[in-house]
Image: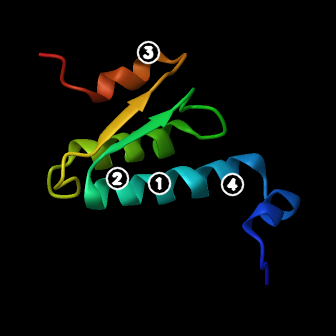
Amino acid sequence: MLNNPVELNNYLSSGTVKGMVIFTLAQEVLKNGGYIVVDEIENHFNKEIVTTLMRFFMDMKVNKHGGTLIFSTHYPELLDEYDRG
């Protein structure tokens, strides 16, 4: 049992820690509205995890308070998830 969240870095991979942090923050933004900014969203994540996160923000049933995901990426194919019409 960990008493200090900082200790997670000693036991988990950087990708797992990043995922826990991002999905926890995203949950708050989806619940209450606001913004989440992620630099190089694809780092430490596979494409399915990234597209799932993006779809949460696009789904008005999940994102009832208009939370916004702002991210940078080196993979433009991630943008294919968005309707640019």
Q: Which residue is mark 3?
A: 76
Mark 3 / mark 4, whichever is N-terminal: 4
Labels 1 and 3: the sequence-earlier one: 1
2 and 1 marks in contact (CB < 8 Å): yes
Vertical relation: 55 (above or below) 77? below
- Find residue 36 and report its horizontal and vertical position in percent: 42, 41
The amino acid beneath tag 2 is Val
Q: Amino acid at mark 4?
A: Val
Of marks 2 and 4, the one in the foreground: 2
Q: Residue at x 35, y 22 (%)?
A: 79
Q: Label 2: which residue?
A: 29
Colour approach in the figure: rainbow
Q: Secondary structure at mark 1?
A: helix
Q: Nearer the viewer, mark 2 or mark 3?
A: 2
The x and y percentages for residue 30 are 30, 55
Residue under numbered circle 4: 17
For discs 1 and 4, the disc positioned in front in the rendered view: 1
Which residue is labeled 1 in the image? 25
- The residue shown at (39%, 30%) is 70
On screen, residue 19 above or below 38: below
